[in-house]
Amino acid sequence: MGTVALSGFAAAHPGRVTELVLLGPARAQDPQAREATRTRAHTVREGGMSAVATLNDAAAFGYRRELECAVGGDAASAS
């Protein structure tokens, strides 16, 4: 999914990108996935990342403890 955003940026701003390496690029999202992405982006704009982030997301990236401290709770009960 990041490759879609990066290739779009490179296409829109060719003067700002000299090289681009895409690993496992998706050429485009299907319409249903695109709508889900837009809905999630709208949610983030309206409510910040905490509106879509969960402790499980944080755990997947190794930030569970930091998020627990930020929300003042236990990962098991807040997930």
Image: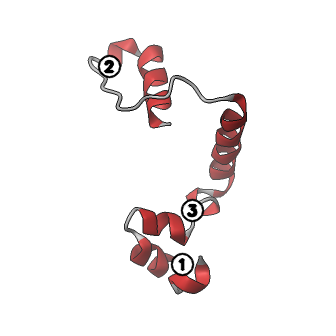
Q: Which residue is mark 2?
A: 17
Kind of residue sitting beneath label 3: Ala
Q: Does dot 3 land on a helix, a strand or a loop? A: loop
Name the residue rendered at 49%, 28% in the picture. 26
Give the mark nearest the N terminus, 2 or 3: 2
Establish if 7 lies above or below 59.
Answer: above
**Front-lying residue, 33 or 16:** 33
* Figure colour scheme: secondary structure
Q: Does dot 1 land on a helix, a strand or a loop? A: helix
Mark 2 crowd level (few <14, some 14–19, many ≥20, 10 Å Cα): few
Q: Which residue is mark 3?
A: 53
Name the residue rendered at 59%, 63% in the picture. 50
Q: Which residue is mark 1?
A: 71
Tell whether label 3 touches label 1 (CB within 8 Å). no
Instruction: Left or right? Give the position of 13 relative to 29.
Output: left
Give the mark nearest the N terminus, 1 or 3: 3
Instruction: Left or right? Give the position of 1 relative to 38.
Output: left
Mark 3 crowd level (few <14, some 14–19, many ≥20, 10 Å Cα): few
Establish if 42 lies above or below 5.
Answer: below
Instruction: Left or right? Give the position of 79 relative to 32.
Output: left
